Image: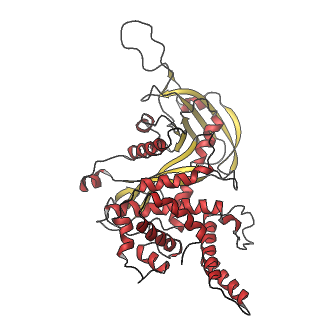
Amino acid sequence: MNVVSSFAVMLQEFAVVMTANTLANFATLVSGWMFAPRRNITSMIVAAGMAGVKHHSAFHRIFAAARWSLDAFGLAVFRLIEPWLDEQEAVPLSLDDTLVHKRGLKIFGAGMHYDPQLSSRGRTVTCWGLNFVVLCVIVRFPLWPERPFSLPVLVRLYLNKKQAARWRRKYRSRPELAVQLLGILCGHRKSRRFHVLADSAYGGASVLQKLPRNCDLTSRLGQNARLYDAPPKATGKRGRPRKRGDKLPTPAEMLDRRAGRKELNIYGRRQKFRIDDMAGRMFKVPDRPLRIVAVEALSGGRGREAFYSTCVDATAVQVLLWYSWRWSVEVTFHDSKQHLGFEEPQGWSRRSAQRTCPMALMLYSLVVLWFVEQGHRQYQPLERPWYPHKQHASFADMLATLRRESARELINTLGITGAGSRKIVGVLDRLSQLAA
């Protein structure tokens, strides 16, 4: 089974990344990836109808040995995303890491990592697997102007200290890998402005000090963070000039004093908050002015929180709305694992571990882009009377539409004619819809 031709055309964008032979084999694997019940190489070959046609090692080599760059592949995906971005505004980015559960001691880079799904506030759980740092572009399509999508473009495999020593690699923390990814993307488009949204793991001084010049950052802040005013001007007296100004109240103290109340439509619901904001600077980064926002939810379980943004002129409400867009990256991770088998590839060598699993994230971006450009015209929602409030197509619907259109295109090429041919085509189309 081959993917629909309108999707196959998108794959030609990667001709500058791969050789012609590798790209042809890759297109075959992508077709199998969309239809295979399990996303390992052999299952993809069977689903694509290439079992016995070409030796299976040719497809294994695409990820394990072929000379192509995952970074170059991701930048090609970014070029596909660019037409949907506003040229006058900064490009919003989301940054986070995710755990891919694995088994086996010989898998390159596999180690014990924190599992956020099994952990709770009072209990920390670690699991064996691969940890990837992912940089996504946040896009708001005209079809759903209020629904942000995080489309992955760049990925890095994180090695903990034990695994880095085992595989004789230089240890780099997750924030250091994040700075690498930001440098690649921001350096690729130096004339554009970027704005990355990340949680507190990537909001420390190690990232803030090394941000590219054309990139801003919005992240979380601790309730007891030490904040300072701008340093006073030099007086000409002897001695080292001050690096920091007067000490400012912490976010917790900001909420203890008088704070205004506002009602915001955030995270899909309307809530009331107590909000206070001010301009300040971190203790470890005294030369970078920030907009500090302290907020307390008056309903729900969010409680007190604090955020900051390097966009000093932004309002408190804008900072909160920006940070709420970051949640779309969690949706991306869920959909990639649930529907594209992000955790299922079984490669164990270095290149295979670094490139096979992240390809599910890249295909997530391609499926969403295809649906926005072509697939939404053929979208046929299934009849679900028990789900009356659904307004938008989910990623599962997008993938089902891609599979259905691929099957329909194949059926149309069969040239079925005669009595009952319309019914035959209708039955096959329905079967492809249910199988999706």
Measuring from the top left, give residue 283's x and y in whole percent: 44, 28
* Residue most extreme to the front: 20
Q: Is residue 294 left or right of residue 121?
A: right
Left or right of 368: which side holds 99?
left
Q: Is residue 79 shown above or below 222?
A: below
- The answer to whether residue 322 shows anywhere in this view is yes
Front residue of 55/102: it is 55
**In the image, what residue occupies the spot 57% across and 63% down?**
367
Image mark count: 0
* Camera-side residue of 278 and 158: 158
Question: Can residue 153 be seen at all in this image of the molecule?
Answer: no
Q: Position of residue 231 (x, y in %)?
A: 47, 18
Where in the figure is residue 85, as x and y percent of width and height?
61, 47
| Residue in the picture at 64% in, 70% down | 401
246 relative position to 241: left or right: right
Q: Is residue 130 left or right of residue 391?
A: left
Question: For the view shown, which residue lies furthest in the bottom direction?
Answer: 419
Quadrant including the C terminus? bottom right
| Quadrant of res 50 | bottom left
